[in-house]
Amino acid sequence: MLTALVTGGASGIGEAVSRRLAAAGAKVGVVDRDAVAASRVAAEIDGLALACDVSSESALSSAFAEVESWGGRLDVVHLNAGSVGGQSGITDLDVEAYRRVLGVNVDHVVFGLNAAVPALRRAGGGTIIATASLAGLVPLPGDAIYTLTKHAVVGYVRSAAATLAPEGIRAMALCPGFADTALIAHIKEQFGDFPLLTPGDVADAVEAMLDRGEPGECWYVQPGREPGPYGFRGVPGPRTGDAPPSLSWEG
């Protein structure tokens, strides 16, 4: 039986993924800052609830160790917890809020991947999916801080994937558009008739990624479209001479 760990697993996209993985037969560790919600979801899927500040390296590392011990192994990690910036970050920078968003959106992914890799190695391989956003692929002018963090997730996952793939560990990024979750509850009325994803739509994409995703892929998820890997264009090389391998990037 596979064991999975989902951060932000007690609400929204994380809850939908936790339930989907459990329905497929996995043992699921539900990691969330909301202990009550985590316990509720875990009880309903026969999982393990862990209250955790995902921006804390020590707390997240302990959560990974507990899930691996409970499940006997670790096979799937969904680093899904996230936070909105709530500021443009251009003329209204709130440094404390900026650090807080970086902690959840960036530090958590770095700490989570570092905690996941040893466990996945012990299992003989596995999959890491980090939730980024379409804001990790295109600019979101109203929230430059959020966009910064999600671009960071995309870049980190794509870079890490090449290192981990030879060990049978797939690292991928999930890039959904606007989803009807608590993260946008405060601005939902601004969307009007604009179509929103449901958490279930995004869980569908996670299932597809687990089934056929390739290392380093960043899957877009948009209403009315089949999810799939985003096609990055290659960076133009030099006009003359051969670039060193480390400087010859391809998308």
Image (cartoon, grey):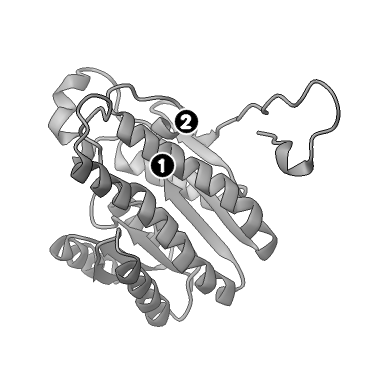
Label 1 Cα neighbours within 10 Å, binned few <14 / some 14-19 / many ≥20 = many
Task: Say which element carries label 1.
Answer: loop
Q: Which residue is mark 1?
A: 132
Q: Which residue is mark 2?
A: 137
Q: Residue furthest right?
A: 241
Estimate the x, y position of residue 200 in percent, counting from the top left: 34, 43
Residue at 68% x, 28% y: name it: 234
Asked if one can make out residue 75 in the rendered structure from this viewpoint, the answer is yes
Estimate the x, y position of residue 118 in percent, counting from the top left: 53, 72
Estimate the x, y position of residue 124 in percent, counting from the top left: 61, 72
Q: Nearer the viewer, residue 238 or 17?
A: 238
What amino acid is found at the position of numbered circle 1 in the picture? Ala
The reply, left or right, for residue 205 in relation to residue 53 is right
Estimate the x, y position of residue 116 in percent, counting from the top left: 47, 66
Q: Residue furthest top?
A: 193
Residue at 45% x, 44% y: name it: 153
Question: Dividing the image into 4 quarters, which one contains the C terminus?
Answer: top right
Q: Nearer the viewer, residue 241 or 236?
A: 241
